[in-house]
Image (tube, grey):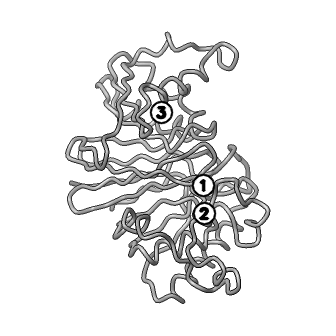
Amino acid sequence: MNTLVRFWGTRGSIPTPGNRTRRYGGNTSCVSITVGSALFICDGGTGLRELGVSLAEEHGEQALEAHLFFSHTHWDHIQGFPFFMPAYSERNKLYVYDATREDDRVRQLLLGQMSSDYFPVTFRDLGSKITSRNLEVGHTLIDGVSIGHREQVHPGKSFAYSFEAGGKKVVYATDSELDLSIQNRDESDRDASALRQLPADLLRFMEGADLLIADGQYTDAEYPEKRGWGHARANTVVDLAVQAGVKQCAIFHHDPMHSDERVEQIVAEGQARAAAHGSAVQVFAAREGIELRV
């Protein structure tokens, strides 16, 4: 089965349209993963609107089925849902998955932002069938795709997801403060070039991924003032990819203050870091609109 990954929103925290972010995009988090005929959507930031427009054009009058996975429900990850066109058609079925195993929690939070205090259109105007599902312990099988999940370090909790089928593996892991899990923190603080060792169970979850999409919002210089905010240094993401034997690593959730040029500097530093540690992992910046065949 072919696995296609497309970035619809790559920015973190708040949408940032404008000339400074034209190349890598200003929409907040949204990634689609298509495996065969199955559609998986990771997060529903403002990029979800663009995805919805594309799906409506592609499917026309045909029914659509989509599986939605949310890393967490902070606003920059759900704010595109009220503008997701397929949600308004009675032909369509949307499945919303909850890794916390709290019945209907994610669905209720998605719809809560559509109360009259926040939005002029109510849940009653959504014609599609929206069903909540809880993920199983370990792995959940959906249309031949094995999906794993893992809790991450982030205020209020977040989750990473792995999608495996046909010998291919994609991991979506945004809003995770990896730096709080570094095992050799004293050494790596003294020597910034030292490989930042991360927990074995985290490495097993990421191990051998053909594509890792990971939050690398901060530079090394920025992070000390942002500690506890729930995001990682891009260089720490690179070290994770090196240790887990990842083939491609997309730096994701770009800081709203980072211009395209700054993003490219961060990636260039990450590429040099991976090479210095003897890794062949391809490090690049997630860019709105690109599609990868994994």
Residue type at numbered disc 3: Val
Q: Position of residue 204 (x, y in %)?
A: 36, 67
* Residue at 55% in and 25% down: 82
> SS class of the residue under badge 2?
loop
Front residue of this view, candidates 18 and 251: 251
Quarter location, residue 68: top left
Report, in whole angstroms, how far the alpha carbon at label 1 lies from the one at label 2.
7 Å
The residue tagged 2 is 216
Front residue of this view, candidates 270 and 180: 180
Q: Position of residue 33 (x, y in %)?
A: 37, 48
**Mark sitting on residue 253:** 1
The residue tagged 3 is 53
Front residue of this view, candidates 258 and 226: 226
Tell whether label 2 touches label 1 (CB within 8 Å): yes
Q: How many marks?
A: 3
Q: Local crowd at mark 1 within 10 Å, few (<14), some, or many (≥20)? A: many
| Placement of 242 over or under 93, stated as above or below | below
Residue type at numbered disc 2: Gly
Residue type at numbered disc 1: His
Compare marks 1 and 3 and give the one earlier in the sequence.
Answer: 3
> SS class of the residue under badge 1?
loop
Give the quadrant of the C terminus: bottom left
Q: Local crowd at mark 3 within 10 Å, few (<14), some, or many (≥20)? A: some
